[in-house]
Image (cartoon, rainbow, N blue to C red):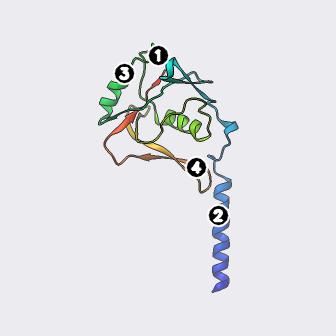
């Protein structure tokens, strides 16, 4: 019986280590495709170095519907730009990923809370990205159980 238990523990450890070794999320900061962020436009906008994408520095809200969040983003005028929009979940991931690897330069945003996003099909998403360090790091999108969330607009 003890021999079988030892065999099962050895097998479980091997499976866990195999899963950790094959984790595609296990990237170093040198693999970060988006580079660093820097604060521009009087401290109200952060810009990605490589993509030139701009992010609203402050999070605003809460907003209680996708329509309300989209209306806010569309009406935003920051840094002389009026083409702000809600980010996709993928764009929110890129922003979280830069922050996770401390590649956010002098653009220290508040990432806590639930954020509105849209899919490519314009379906709403409300939630946040978080890290799981078990096989470290692995990132998961967590859908919100709340009905309200913040907006961090992006352009273009």
SS type, badge 2:
helix
Marks 2 and 4, how far apart at CA: 17 Å
Numbered disc in front, either 4 or 1: 1
Marks 3 and 2, how far apart at CA: 48 Å
- Check disc 4 and report the residue beneath it: 138
Badge 4 or badge 3: first in the primary sequence: 3
Instruction: Note whether 150 is above or below 136 in the view shown.
Output: above
Q: Are marks 4 and 1 in contact (CB under 8 Å)?
A: no
Question: Which quadrant: the N terminus?
Answer: bottom right
Marks 3 and 1, how far apart at CA: 14 Å
Marks 4 and 1, how far apart at CA: 35 Å
Name the outermost residue toward the bottom: 1
Other-residue count near label 1 (Cα within 10 Å), few / some / many at <14 / 14–19 / ≥20: some
- Check disc 3 and report the residue beneath it: 74
Numbered disc in front, either 3 or 1: 1
SS type, badge 3:
helix
> Residue 127: which quarter of the image?
top left
SS type, badge 4:
strand
The total of numbered circles placed on residues is 4
Badge 2 or badge 4: first in the primary sequence: 2
- Check disc 1 and report the residue beneath it: 79
Q: Nearer the viewer, residue 40 or 63?
A: 40
Badge 3 or badge 2: first in the primary sequence: 2
- Check disc 2 and report the residue beneath it: 15
Other-residue count near label 3 (Cα within 10 Å), few / some / many at <14 / 14–19 / ≥20: some
Badge 4 or badge 1: first in the primary sequence: 1
Q: Are marks 1 and 2 in contact (CB under 8 Å)?
A: no
Residue 124 horizontal side relative to residue 40, left or right: left
Q: Residue at x 67, y 59 (%)?
A: 18
Other-residue count near label 2 (Cα within 10 Å), few / some / many at <14 / 14–19 / ≥20: few
Badge 3 or badge 1: first in the primary sequence: 3
């Amino acid at each position: 019986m003890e021999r079988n238990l030892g065999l099962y523990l050895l097998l479980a450890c091997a499976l866990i280590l195999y899963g950790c070794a094959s984790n595609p999320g296990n990237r170093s900061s040198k693999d970060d495709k988006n580079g660093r962020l820097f604060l521009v436009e009087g401290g109200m906008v952060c810009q990605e170095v490589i993509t030139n994408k701009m992010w609203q520095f402050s999070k605003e809200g809460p907003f209680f519907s996708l329509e309300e969040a989209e209306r806010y983003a569309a009406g935003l005028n920051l840094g002389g730009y009026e083409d702000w929009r809600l980010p996709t979940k993928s764009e929110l991931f890129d922003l979280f990923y830069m922050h996770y690897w401390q590649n956010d330069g002098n653009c220290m945003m508040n990432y806590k809370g639930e954020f509105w996003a849209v899919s490519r099909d314009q379906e709403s998403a409300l939630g946040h990205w978080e890290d799981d360090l078990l096989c470290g790091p692995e990132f998961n999108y967590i859908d919100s159980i709340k009905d309200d969330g913040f907006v961090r607009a992006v352009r273009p």
